[in-house]
Image (cartoon, grey):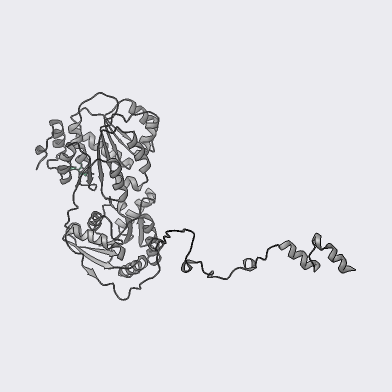
Amino acid sequence: MTFQDLNLNTPLLNALEDLKFDTPTPIQEQAFSSIMSGKDVVGIAQTGTGKTFAYMLPILRMLKYSEQKNPRVLILVPTRELVVQVREEIEKLTAYMNTRVTGIYGGTNINTQHSDLLQGLDIIVATPGRLYDLILRRAVQMKSIQKLVIDEVDVMLDLGFRFQINNIIELLPQNRQNIMFSATMTEAVEEIIDISFKQPIKISVAISGTPLDNIEQRGYKIANFHTKVNFLKDLLKDKETYTKVLIFVAYKRLADRLFQSLAEEFPEECTVIHSNKTQNYRLRSIKQFGEGFCRVLVATDVMARGLDIENVSHVINFDTPEYPENYMHRIGRTGRAEKEGISFLLSTEKEQDNLEKIENLMNMQVPQYELPENIEISTVLIPEEQPKIFEINNPNKRGDEDAPGPAFHDKSEKNSKENLGGSYRREIAKKYKKPQTRGDKGANRRHKK
Ligand code: AMP
């Protein structure tokens, strides 16, 4: 298939010709007819798949020339860099069209952006925070938005933009087309789809069920976090084999916890990235890992998404992802460019359902291996693994087995005193041998006699 086969118009075809693009990428092919249908669309695609053109081509195909002031297309992206990049891509595609595009992002003068918006525009590419500020200043109105694109929504949610996204969505007309692109599927992403999208068409690429042939997959059933850590520490001792190890975990807290445990044993060899780390920290981590100064990188799914790191010797799925697509993305980070890669999948009892979903998607079983005998099985559970106690009738009542036991340590001298109550009275009594109270005065006198 070529771009000529899509229902494009001459200005777009000319622009593509200038760019020397003749064949649509798979996501572009799939997205075109779905978006042209006018229905809501959810696309699962990573950077590098051509996803920007995948949504821009049909949007530009449908966008009619207009001189109206208020924007008709809103594209929300997570970072300033992406605003710039998407705006540039749009400018390339609209070389033969009269389309007004503005990029809005934080960290620069808001007044300049305010006056840019007042000029009138067709397409607005923005980070949610700054756009919302400008809406509050009445620099731009959302009432004529016909198409909303949320790009890299997983990153956006991970960066904590949920509130701003919701605020902006509330200001949009009901009658609009929603388009979303995300590299990974998470519960938070699904929630936005459930709330704001109308029976979306779902498209995806690269997450075909077939894993790359040159990736060897190994599954291990491991009881808990600490035993998984023991296993990893044992593997990583072999520095010649485990030269560039990318470890995936589901969420930030777990990433920090795992990083700390591994760094105890392998200081200077491990690094970590997730969205609570500063941009500088993340860039440094990626550089250290990419250039081989650190051989272990612990990363959350979302953060590892955009990484372009070569020669990963091993991918370790420290947990078993709930969304099988994430597993496909994770293991795809190794075994690239004709090189053999090895992927480990560690699953607890609770994660067996997730493992099943992954195996169903791939239509193959992950070969299971026995945990080597020298690995110490830990019985210590991290807080997330501890069973939650639910009481049905009386939330304040404790069963005997849950009653607080004695402290593990001896009480300090100060705290070990028994509280007998009425301390003033006791002090006085000690001094005068007998209670000095009004009623006792007579008794004392009697005593003196
Ligand atoms: P994206 O996934 O949108 O970040 O795009 C990745 C890169 O691929 C960008 O530099 C695009 O300009 C380029 N690209 C997009 N579509 C095509 C295509 N059909 N053929 C060749 N390159 C493309």
Q: Determine whether, in the image, residue 215 is placed left or right of residue 170.
A: left
Q: Residue furthest top?
A: 67
Q: Residue furthest bottom?
A: 373
Eyeballing the image, is 23 above or below 236? above
Query: Residue 411 occupies which quadrant of the picture?
Result: bottom right
Q: Can residue 334 be seen at all in this image of the molecule?
A: no
Pick the front one: 143 or 20: 143
Quarter of the picture containing the N terminus is top left
Query: Residue 364 occupies which quadrant of the picture?
Result: bottom left
Eyeballing the image, is 379 above or below 35? below
Where residue 76 appears, as percent x and y from the top left, is 30, 39
Q: Residue furthest right?
A: 449
Eyeballing the image, is 181 above or below 334? above
User: What residue do we see at 12% from left, 35% from top?
Assistant: 7
Pick the front one: 302 or 164: 164
Where residue 298 appears, as percent x and y from the top left, is 33, 58
Pick the front one: 358 or 238: 358
Q: Determine whether, in the image, residue 27 is placed left or right of residue 270.
A: left
Q: Can residue 441 be seen at all in this image of the molecule?
A: yes
Pick the front one: 388 or 368: 388
User: What residue do we see at 61% from left, 68% from top?
Assistant: 412
User: What residue do we see at 70% from left, 62% from top?
Assistant: 422
Query: Residue 210 occupies which quadrant of the picture?
Result: bottom left
Quarter of the picture containing the C terminus is bottom right
Q: Determine whether, in the image, residue 91 is placed left or right of residue 18.
A: right
Eyeballing the image, is 264 above or below 68? below
Which of the four quarters of the rendered structure image does ligand 1 lie in? top left
Where residue 164 appears, as percent x and y from the top left, is 37, 40
Q: Residue furthest front?
A: 393
Where residue 401 appears, as percent x and y from the top left, is 46, 69
